[in-house]
Image (cartoon, rainbow, N blue to C red):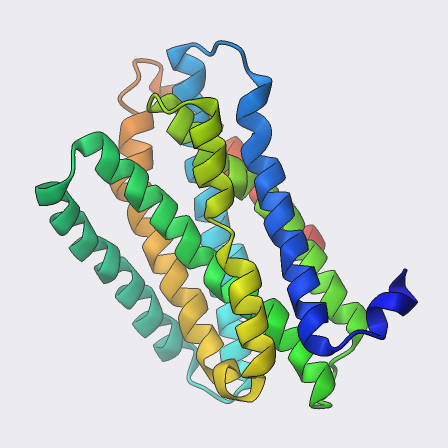
């Protein structure tokens, strides 16, 4: 199986690898089909869980790799991630103001959630594509096994991220099919940008730290402005806070163990 994969063109390798990461996201989003009826307390706890997942992903999946990539590319690490992080947060801030005028509170929250996760998946797709493109260009340290392990690690991290989208949608009254649809849709950008990253590896590699920190800023804005306040509106605030801690812990372990 591995031999067959290694004989493919690097563009096809990047496409197949990012289709895997997308598929695991879809699998995570499908968790909504396993519940028949969920109480409001559980739904709010799941919202807190999603917030914890996104906070952990913002650092361990985005900011930490952005710092490492900045250093390896001889960029100023603190300035690069500062610019990217603030830009991502400001984009969602402006989107928040626009959505307030155009959408209901419910639809605004959902659109911001899906948007932030989608933005987060773009640099992950680029990272996998760059990993396979680097093999073709013979860049130092680039191997098929390391690229595959990167894709597998990102894919496994995507499982709780898929549920972090679909579960809040279910809580907001969306049907299970719609919640799953939007949950998996948030990761469809990964195969697209995986191919772009493989094609343009030498050009987009230097921009990857910015894209990673940009996505982190967008995610943190949504967590702070939407998810945590909504989960903390529950009378059992302490239980909701523990749910956020659990979500953070699970995502942290996945990122560190698979990083």
Q: In which quadrant will I find the C terminus?
A: bottom right
Please tell me whether residue 80 is drawn above or below residue 87 in the rendered image.
below
For the point 49% across and 70% down, the residue is 66
The percent coordinates of residue 89 (x first, y second) are: 27, 58
Please tell me whether residue 127 is drawn above or below residue 205 in the rendered image.
above
Please tell me whether residue 109 is drawn above or below residue 4 in the rendered image.
above
Q: Is residue 245 left or right of residue 139?
A: left
Q: Is residue 165 left or right of residue 22?
A: left
Q: In which quadrant will I find the N terminus?
A: bottom right
The percent coordinates of residue 254 (x first, y second) are: 65, 47
Please tell me whether residue 245 is drawn above or below residue 184 in the rendered image.
above
In the picture, residue 12 is in which quadrant? bottom right
Numbered marks: total: 0
Q: Nearer the viewer, residue 51 or 120?
A: 120
For the point 49% across and 58% down, the residue is 189
In the picture, residue 86 is in which quadrant? bottom left
Q: Nearer the viewer, residue 253 or 175?
A: 175
Q: Is residue 184 left or right of residue 175?
A: right
For the point 40% across and 74% down, the residue is 210
The percent coordinates of residue 258 (x first, y second) are: 70, 54
Q: Nearer the viewer, residue 118 or 87?
A: 118
For the point 37% across and 45% down, the residue is 114
Q: Is residue 139 left or right of residue 201?
A: right
The percent coordinates of residue 26 (x first, y second) are: 58, 41
In the picture, residue 14 is in which quadrant? bottom right
> Looking at the image, can residue 244 be seen?
no
């Amino acid at each position: 199986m591995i031999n067959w994969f290694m004989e493919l063109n690097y563009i096809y390798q990047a496409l197949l690898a990012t289709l895997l990461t997308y598929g695991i996201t879809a699998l995570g989003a499908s968790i909504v089909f396993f519940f028949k009826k969920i109480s409001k307390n559980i739904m709010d706890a799941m919202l807190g869980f999603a917030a914890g997942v996104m906070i952990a992903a913002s650092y361990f999946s985005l900011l930490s790799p952005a710092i490492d990539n900045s250093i390896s590319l001889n960029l100023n690490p603190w300035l690069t991630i500062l610019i990217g992080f603030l830009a991502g947060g400001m984009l969602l801030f402006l989107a928040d103001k626009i959505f307030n005028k155009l959408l209901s509170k419910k639809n605004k929250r959902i659109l911001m959630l899906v948007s932030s996760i989608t933005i987060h998946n773009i640099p992950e797709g680029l990272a996998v594509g760059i990993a396979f493109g680097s093999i073709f260009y013979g860049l130092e340290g680039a191997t098929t096994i390391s690229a595959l392990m990167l894709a597998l690690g990102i894919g496994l991290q995507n499982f709780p991220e898929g549920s972090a989208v679909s579960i809040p949608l279910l809580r907001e009254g969306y049907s299970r099919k719609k919640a799953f649809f939007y949950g998996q849709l948030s990761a469809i950008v990964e195969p697209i940008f995986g191919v772009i990253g493989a094609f343009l590896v030498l050009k987009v590699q230097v921009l990857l730290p910015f894209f990673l920190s940009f996505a982190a800023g967008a995610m943190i804005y949504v967590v702070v402005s939407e998810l945590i306040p909504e989960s903390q509106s529950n009378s059992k605030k302490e239980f909701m806070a523990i749910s956020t801690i659990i979500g953070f812990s699970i995502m942290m372990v996945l990122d560190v163990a698979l990083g």
